[in-house]
Image (tube, rainbow, N blue to C red):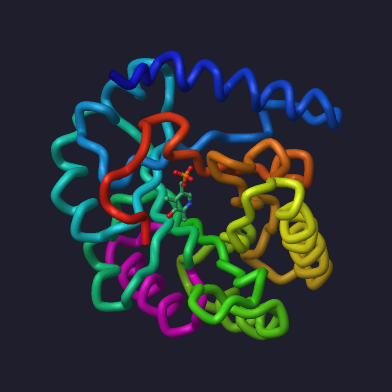
């Protein structure tokens, strides 16, 4: 049996320790519990332990599951997103982490104009420049940011990455470091509606290293809810 309360408590401790190690305030690092493939009851159980933010990666699953969750959780959308499915997220998610192309940003802007609300987004960077992964390349980022920043309703809060999988978290460190450098460069542009204060990086296997490199949003699934049966992507 998975002990969600114990897992969350253990992760919070590890987040605090990682922050302490590099002299960061733990209040600036938020844990996103990645609940994809997991039932509403487990989300409610995590919420009862004080966990507020939850991440989902599949639109269809989110559509079906989110109405079953009674607790006032804050939803984050992390997964690949087709423009024609953005409407199912409209008004329901607090932040979309996976914006990687202008056409998608335009559709998000259009949908949130309908409800006259702002929506926080992050630009996903394919930091390892891997063929099979989504995300804009580091070289494309500045252009994309300029175009996206001009769209109504969008608040560009920072960057997100899913670095190459490495068994050893130390091998991922340079990618996290690179994402932070990119965010700093983008901040220098001082574009309106762009704040660049959020770095969404770090998962179950490497969130401490991500925090050491500046993560403000860590996305942890397996270490809270246990292994997923369905493949994650
Ligand atoms: C599934 C997923 C995670 C969580 O991964 P774990 O290794 O289970 O912690 C984080 N980020 C994204 C984008 C995901 O799809």
The foreground one among 21 and 28 is: 21
Q: Residue at x 20, y 27 (%)?
A: 41
The foreground one among 194 and 124 is: 124
State which quarter of the image contains the C terminus.
bottom left
Q: Residue at x 45, y 14 (%)?
A: 6
Q: Which secondary structure class fits the magenta region best?
A: helix
Q: Is residue 127 left or right of residue 66?
A: right
Q: Is residue 10 left or right of residue 74?
A: right
The foreground one among 146 and 173 is: 173
Q: Residue at x 65, y 42 (%)?
A: 216
The quarter of the picture where residue 46 lies is top left
Decide whether residue 113 is among the magenta residues. Answer: yes
Residue lying farthest to the front in this orientation: 167
Q: Is residue 185 left or right of residue 75?
A: right
Q: What span is in magenta?
A: 99-117
Q: Residue at x 33, y 16 (%)?
A: 48
| Residue 213 place in picture, x, y as percent | 78, 46
State which quarter of the image contains the N terminus.
top left
The foreground one among 193 and 72 is: 72
| Residue 34 place in picture, x, y as percent | 40, 42
Q: Is residue 12 left or right of residue 82?
A: right
| Residue 27 place in picture, x, y as percent | 67, 27
Q: Is residue 107 above or below residue 33?
A: below
Decide whether residue 64 is among the magenta residues. Answer: no
């Amino acid at each position: 049996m998975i002990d969600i309360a114990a897992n969350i408590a253990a992760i919070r401790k590890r987040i605090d320790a990682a922050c302490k190690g590099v002299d960061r305030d733990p209040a600036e690092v938020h844990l996103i519990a990645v609940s994809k493939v997991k039932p509403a009851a487990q989300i409610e159980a995590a919420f009862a332990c004080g966990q507020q933010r939850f991440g989902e990666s599949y639109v269809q699953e989110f559509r079906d599951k989110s109405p079953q969750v009674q607790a006032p959780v804050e939803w984050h959308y992390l997964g690949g997103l087709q423009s024609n499915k953005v409407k199912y997220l409209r008004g329901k998610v607090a932040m979309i982490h996976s914006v990687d192309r202008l056409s998608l940003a335009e559709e998000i802007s259009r949908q949130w104009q309908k409800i006259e609300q702002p929506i926080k987004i992050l630009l996903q960077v394919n930091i390892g420049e891997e063929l099979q992964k989504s995300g804009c390349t580091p070289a494309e980022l500045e252009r994309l940011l300029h175009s996206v920043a001009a769209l109504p309703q969008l608040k560009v809060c920072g960057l997100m990455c899913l670095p190459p999988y490495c068994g050893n978290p130390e091998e991922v460190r340079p990618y996290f470091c690179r994402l932070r450098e990119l965010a700093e460069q983008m901040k220098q542009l001082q574009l309106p509606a762009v704040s660049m204060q959020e770095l969404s990086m770090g998962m179950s296997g490497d969130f401490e290293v991500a925090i050491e490199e500046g993560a403000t949003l860590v996305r942890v699934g397996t270490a809270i809810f246990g292994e997923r049966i369905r493949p994650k992507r």
